[in-house]
Image (cartoon, helix red, strand yellow):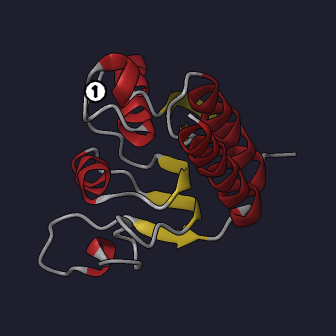
């Protein structure tokens, strides 16, 4: 029996936990091709001193390296947080077929929260997008991270 969207999102949540354990905002992503996870990534901009080291970009890089191709047609990307504009651009350039996200991002999300780049007909590639998969678990991880960070800031 094949894996479900929830199973793939759980794998993305594992990546998010890795980010959190490194002191990064806990966002994780996986790239799936023909039912197999071929790319994994988690937020690492602080540790890598790289503003582009978001979970989606890291997962895309991993998958592209494994396939030996910067294009990932037919692949799906699962991410715990709604993609930002930068990551959505990378997703489109990689020709990802489908994006599934967990929690919405009301500040930088461009899959319907701030903007909807995925509905922009003038762009040359369109990934199918759906959100809300394990949204509560994804959102709770982010909320607890930021609550802990605020607590440290207030007590320092």
Task: Kindly identify the residue that appears in the image at 53 percent across and 56 percent down.
Answer: 81
Task: Kindly identify the residue that appears in the image at 36 percent across and 46 percent down.
Answer: 73
Percent coordinates x, y for residue 17 in the rendering: 67, 33
Q: Is residue 58 visible from the viewing direction of this image?
A: yes
In the drawing, does residue 94 fall left or right of residue 130? left
Query: Depth check: 37 or 131 in front?
Result: 131
Percent coordinates x, y for residue 18 in the rendering: 63, 26
State the quadrant of the N terminus. Answer: top right
Percent coordinates x, y for residue 69 in the rendering: 28, 27
Task: Kindly identify the residue that appears in the image at 54 percent across and 71 percent down.
Answer: 130
Q: Is residue 33 visible from the viewing direction of this image?
A: no
On screen, residue 102 above or below 52 = below
In the drawing, does residue 14 fall left or right of residue 121? right
In the drawing, does residue 149 fall left or right of residue 122? right
Quarter holding residue 45: top left
The single residue placed furthest to the left in the displayed view is 122
Q: Which residue is mark 1?
A: 69
**Disc 1 on helix, strand or loop?**
loop
């Amino acid at each position: 029996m094949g894996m479900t969207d929830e199973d793939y999102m759980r794998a993305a949540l594992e990546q998010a936990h890795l980010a959190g354990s490194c002191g990064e905002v806990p966002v994780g992503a996986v790239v799936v091709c023909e039912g197999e996870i071929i790319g994994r990534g988690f937020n690492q901009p602080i540790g890598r001193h790289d503003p582009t080291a978001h979970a989606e970009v890291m997962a895309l890089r991993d998958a592209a390296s494994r396939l030996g191709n910067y294009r990932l047609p037919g692949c799906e990307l699962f991410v715990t947080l709604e993609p930002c504009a930068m990551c959505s651009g990378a997703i489109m350039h990689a020709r990802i077929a489908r994006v599934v996200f967990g929690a919405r991002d009301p500040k930088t999300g461009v899959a319907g929260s701030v903007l909807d780049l995925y509905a922009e007909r003038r762009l040359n590639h369109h990934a199918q997008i759906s959100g809300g998969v394990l949204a509560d678990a994804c959102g709770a991880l982010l909320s607890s991270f930021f609550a802990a960070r605020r607590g440290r800031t207030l007590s320092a």
